[in-house]
Amino acid sequence: MYKIMLVDDEAEVREAIRESIDWSRHGYEFAGSYANGAEALDAILDVRPDLVLSDICMPLMDGIEMTKHVSRAAPDTKVVILTGHDEFDYAQQALRLKVHDFVVKPITPRELRALLDRIKLELDREAEERESMARLREQLQESLPLLKERFLECLVQGSIGEEEAERKFAYFGLAKPVPPLVAISVDIDQLDEHSRERWENNPELQRYAAYKIALEATEDRSALVFRTKEERVVALLSGIPEDGDDDIVQLSETIRRSVEKYMKFTVTVGVGTRCASLGELPCSYEASLSALDYRFLLGNNRVIRLQDLEQPASFSCPPDYEWNRKFASALKTGTHRETHQLIEQFIGQLKSSSLPLEVCYVRTQSMMIDTVNSIRELLGDGGDWLRQLGAALQNIDGFHRLEDVEAWLKNISAEAIRLIAERRSDLSQLQVRSAIEYIEQHYQEESLSLMDICNHVHMSKSYFSTLFKQHTGQTMMEYVTRIRLETAKTLLQADPPIKTYDIAESVGYGDPQYFSVLFKKHVGVTPTEFRDAATKEPTA
């Protein structure tokens, strides 16, 4: 029911109108009748009726003045003016006030019922529109988290302009990231049977759990955390200090360990490169995705930083993000099958494109240049292979068939995979050998730490620890302890004997008591017992 009020200074008119209409039948509730505008205005502002039927000429406050107040204080209330033939000037004023309608007196009950029915239809339509708008606002409010995530995903993919980004940062109430920036990507590893049962085969629930862990880990930092359509969690870290690389790796390790400890599944975290502006952010994001691709080589449940894997060459964003990223990742991880599939995909598309021969040459040469650049970024600019590739590019006209180009691309990708594997193995061995030499030179120093060695070989702690154990079968501290105790054994057999506390200090243990406990734990006897056994004459 819509509420209606009647305003007229003639009591007979008010009574006649009220008695001539079955208000409820037409969808109205009669909310009162009043003799002038002043009296009616207070009631209108209190009741807020949907419709007011009002005369113009009334004492104290006429219909025009009342309508002015109603339009300002109750704009949703419709006013219909009832006027006589000799009040046309008043009718013009009413129109300027945007009254809903005006009707010339006298009005018959039939005409009034038709007017009320027409206005009810308009009120019904407006109510429906308001409900639809309210539903849309509610749906928009519910969708804001998802819309915010899609905006941030477009931002890291480079598919949104700076002006639009500025506007959406404000719309979503997000602080604009301050360079330098780094993107890290968190991806859920493949689950075993037990983990799938624990999480009820609900990947979205797991994804949300990883998202919450990342949010908690970054709550004291300047960071934007969101989920992508590819079911990854991405954190954009801003305002990174110059010496903050290890801190970023440590944050990534915190996320990884927390997921494993509290959620009972594992993730791999890819750390992107540092970038100096929002425009360069896609490069950092692509680097984090490329780092994730190394899971195929290094295994799950770890933090992977691209700089650790591609020294001395530096990462740069390829022009064709999708194809080049996949191809470069396949080269890095030594995936012959994937590189061949990608090459076949390119050649197949070229064959089915019906392009003129000249355009095919241009497209092919561009593809070959992109391939060479991907390999160069991984291997550097030295070596005979680069000169051979350059000569092949100059003789592009010598390839008479696309099959020849396909075979050439497959051959160089296979050779690049072999060279990259050798380069990585050689580099890893050199780095571990350098670390061992450093340990052998500094094991006497009690303050020797993992960070000292990582700084020496220019590697992050997480990657160095993995690499060192792969090559030696021991952690760094286990290796240091072994070197120290082997040296201590030799010194315990010296003649003349050396005091135990001097030996402890000379191998890096300032606390003789701790040295004795550690010695017995690893050797099985105390230093004194070991000396006695070593100096005792062998029995027959």
Image (cartoon, rainbow, N blue to C red):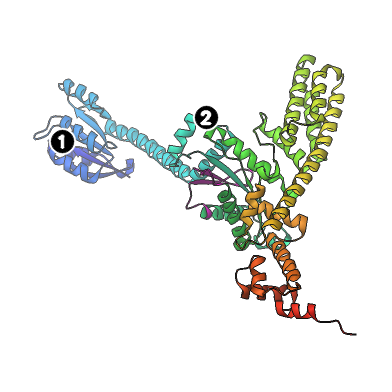
Q: Which residue is mark 1?
A: 8
* Three-letter amino acid code at the position of disc 1: Asp
Instruction: Identify the mark at residue 374; answer none if there is no mark.
Output: none
Percent position (x, y) of residue 445? 63, 61
At 64% from the left edge and 52% from the top edge, which residue is drawn?
454
Q: Which residue carries the number 2 mark?
A: 161
Residue at 64% of width from left, 44% of height from top? 230
Q: Percent x, y for residue 342?
A: 78, 34
**Mark 1 closeness class: few <14, some 14–19, many ≥20 residues within 10 Å:** many
Question: Percent from the top left, x then y, of residue 531?
Answer: 75, 77
| Identity of the residue furthest to the left in this view | 60
User: How many labels sit on residues?
Assistant: 2
* Residue 235 magenta-highlighted: yes
Extreme residue toward the right, this view: 540
**Magenta span contains residue 220:** yes
- Residue 501: percent from left, percent from top: 64, 73
Res. 45 visible in picture: yes
Q: Considering the image in quadrants, where does the N terminus appear?
A: top left
Q: Quadrant of residue 315?
A: top right
For the point 53% across and 40% down, which residue is it? 181
497 relative to 170, above or below: below
- Label 1 and label 2: CA atoms lie apart by 61 Å
* Residue at the far bottom in the pictured view: 540
Q: Which residues are magenta?
A: 217-244
Q: Secondary structure at mark 2?
A: loop
Circle 1 — which element?
Answer: loop
In this view, the residue in front, 474 or 510, is 510
Image height of 214 relative to 291, above or below: below
Q: Nearer the viewer, residue 439 or 126?
A: 439
- Under mark 2, the amino acid is Gly
